[in-house]
Amino acid sequence: MKNTEELKESRIANAWAELQSHAVQGHELDADTYRLAFADPQFMLRRETRGLRMQLEMLKPELERSANDKSKNSSTDNSGCKPADERLYICTGGGPGIMEAANRGAHDVGALSIGLNITLPHEQSGNRFITPSLNFKFHYFALRKMHFMMRAKALVAFPGGMGTLDELFEVLTLVQTRKAQPVPIILFGTEYWKKLIDFDLMVAEGTVSKEDLSFFTYTDDPQVAWNTIKTFYKLT
């Protein structure tokens, strides 16, 4: 019975993907009011149904993550002996480079890790070291960042571009305005970050307070970054 249901779901998913691809290429589908709403990309991609799409992007990773919470797989390093709700897991943007390195580090020690990928103009996909059942793809940056913040216990930001800055300042703003609990925020690559952002100027101009600079730490040493997180959460 289960296999039959999975086959039905697979056929629906494949049919929807084919119809969506057809529409994206500019080939309008014939109007069909009898087509199932969830299997109708012309309907699902309308401006009026954007709220539904956003809700689905919010719901899918949450449900899948809850299912994986029941897994007995270990988490990373020092938190592996902690109760399930106190363990720390690697979560990245799911792409290449330093993100892939982080997922690989978890993968190589047999731990679960999460990838929150995003659709971009240039084709990309989640790196191969993400736990397959925790590899998610988003259309909306806002929903992707919300998923990061809902479960983030620390943020380690490496030198990056607009997307990195967007995510960094989202977290800093939420912590500054008390919309989120404080978490360790580590800016890895001291020279890059100090050249890029003059926080001292912002203090001098009165746009942030001096106390706000305590929200983050500069470092160039991976061990210092990890020690900062361990100290914050009193991990041994």
Image (tube, rainbow, N blue to C red):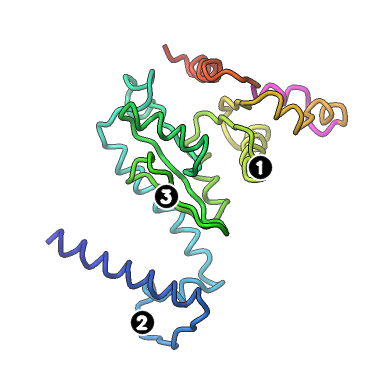
Q: Residue 208 placed where, x, y %?
A: 78, 31
The circle on residue 35 is 2
Task: Report the amino acid beneath label 2.
Answer: Arg
**Residue beneath the point at 55% across and 56% down:** 120
**Res. 128 image quadrant:** top left
SS state under label 2:
loop
**Residue beneath the point at 58% across and 35% down:** 180
* Front residue (pair 76, 180): 76
Question: Is 208 above or below relative to 130?
Answer: above
Residue reaching furthest to the top: 236
* Front residue (pair 121, 176): 121
**Alpha carbon separation for disc pair 2 and 3:** 27 Å
* 144 drawn magenta: no
Task: Report the amino acid beneath label 3.
Answer: Phe
Task: Categorize mark 1 by other alpha carbons within 10 Å: few (<14), some (14-19), many (20+).
Answer: few
Task: Report the amino acid beneath label 1.
Answer: Gly
Range covered by the magenta-colored residues:
206-217
Q: Are marks 1 and 2 in contact (CB under 8 Å)?
A: no
Read off the residue under disc 3.
Answer: 136
Q: Residue 73 placed where, x, y %?
A: 27, 31
Read off the residue under disc 1.
Answer: 161
SS state under label 1:
loop
**Res. 236 image quadrant:** top left
First in sequence: mark 2 vs mark 3: 2
* 216 drawn magenta: yes
**Alpha carbon separation for disc pair 1 and 2:** 43 Å
**Alpha carbon separation for disc pair 3 and 1:** 22 Å
Residue reaching furthest to the left: 1
For the N terminus, the image quarter is bottom left
Task: Categorize mark 3 by other alpha carbons within 10 Å: few (<14), some (14-19), many (20+).
Answer: many
